[in-house]
Amino acid sequence: MDRKRWQTPAFIVLVALAAGCNRGDQPKGDQARAGREVTEPAKEMAGMQTKDMPGMAMSGGEVMVDPAKQQLIGMRMVEATYQPLEKTIRTVGRVDYNERKLKQINAKTEGWIERLYVDFTGQLVKRGDPLFTLYSPELVSTQEEYLLALQAKQQTSSSPFHHVAAGGSSLLEAARRRLQLWDVTPEQIADLERNGRPSKTLTLVSPIDGFVIEKTALEGMRVEPSMVLYKIADLSSVWIYADIYEYELPLVRVGQQATVRLSYEPGRTFQGRVVYVYPYLDSKTRTAKVRLELPNTGDRRLKPGMFADIELKVALGRRLAVPQEAILDSGTRQIVFVEKGKGHFEPKEVTLGLRVDGRQEIVSGLTPGTQVVASANFFLDSESRLRESMGLMAGMAGMERMRTGGMEGMQGMEKTEPGAQMTAKAPTGPQEKRVNDITLTFSTVPSPPKVGQNLLRVRLTDSTGEVIRNAKVSFSFTMPMPGMSAVKADGSLTKDGSFETKALLGMGGTWQVTVKVTIPGKPEIEQMFAVGAGGGQ
């Protein structure tokens, strides 16, 4: 009975050892079958759908987010629709005089100022108000000539000779025209005819209602026709000069209505219109001047020299638009995330137009009625970008290079249970691969490698067993997991003919090492090896 107790376990151990030995010496056909068994889980992995993995990147950048996570991250959907867009251009302007309502007052003849009626700058004058009186000997003699011509006309008007009466009339008309050219008003000429004697001085009057903005006239001053004695501005309307940036100029047109506000009078607005767009830009500020004209108030609230806030509203019509926060702009590409249904979202590139008050015009890339994500876009974008790092799970770029030969040494990879991740049993000793007539013998120091600093080493031999030294070898190693990028390093030739480099394996587990070999006159070789790091640093 005791013999039977230990014979049974011993027999089981012997059978297990024999099976293990047979696996180690299995023929090439069995190895091929084993390789196929290994690749089947890998293919299954490559074709794995992520529809049941909330928040995972899918093929083509598509992302799935379950409703619970959508609510958690505050995702909001909006519809791309045609909307009436109105662009508002805001700028600052400077109030100035209306140049069409400025008048200069000067004497048309030489003389002396006898009396000033308007004697300070800023004084308000009405049309016809006296400004000053001027004594001019030439003006006095012209008045006398006018009176003589008037008498001659009266005497010759009854002459039977027509040419004599016509001569008297033409002489009187010439004298009248000379007085008018010297700014003598018709009323003053009528007074001259009524009084019958010349006036010593001539009173010059204001031609408009306005304010005196310049004054050089003084009592007793000798004046000449070239001298500007007064400058009067009519402030019933004013001009405002505004600066518009060059990118906004295409939206500005003559005749557009403008709203003007004064910062120190909140709530009060003035309405004007664009009357001129200047045909040049300021090279320093990259702005063009636009002139607005608007009526002034009765109390002349708008005063030249003031600064004002200006708004120009430009109606753009109905255009396809979405909220501005729905756009992810990288500078070279503009992306929106489109809802595909059942929690699936797809990035879509769009062409943008104008940006108006928090809304963005879509020129192309979307159709009306499309549901797009208006918040949490950055979460979707980061999930979408993970697809390049999840090649082993989503069958992305790089998966097709992992052939059965490239996974040699990973025959221990197996799938535990449905939905579980793959685990790998990496070889612990040197690994050998043959490509055409070149043999690559890969090893690590120490063997097996540890967590920390190690040496990656490969030895190249030809078909005769000779060591190849004139090659260029590079290594890249990474752990196949999301977000981990490969570290690249060039190999250096050692005395024994091997190529090696230092590698810092930062964590325990299976690492993939890709070896690239370039030999003059031969095609480039690229092979993948797997090593298992363990132990302390």
Image: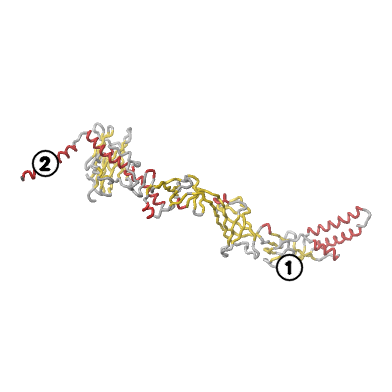
Residue corresponding to mark 2: 11
Give the amino acid at mark 1.
Tyr
Mark 1, residues whose alpha carbon is within 10 Å: few (<14), some, or many (≥20)? some
Q: Position of residue 118 (x, y in %)?
A: 72, 67
Q: Quarter-wise, where is residue 473 in the image?
A: top left
Callout 1 secondary element: loop
Give the amino acid at mark 2.
Phe
Q: Position of residue 60 (x, y in %)?
A: 39, 43
Q: Nearer the viewer, residue 254 or 504?
A: 254
Callout 2 secondary element: helix
Give the numbered dot on residue 117: 1
Q: Residue furthest front?
A: 342
Position of 378 relative to 461 (above/below):
below
Residue at the image point whose x is 62% and y is 55% from the top: 273
Q: Nearer the viewer, residue 137 or 379?
A: 379
Q: Nearer the viewer, residue 90 or 340?
A: 340
**Colour basis:** secondary structure
Position of 245 relative to 132 (above/below):
above
Q: Nearer the viewer, residue 13 or 91?
A: 13
Q: Position of residue 508 (x, y in %)?
A: 25, 48
**Residue 497 appearing in the image:** no
Quadrant occupied by the N terminus: top left
Q: Residue furthest right?
A: 160
Is 303 displayed left or right of 329 in the figure? right
Disc 2 or 1, which lies upstream in sequence? 2
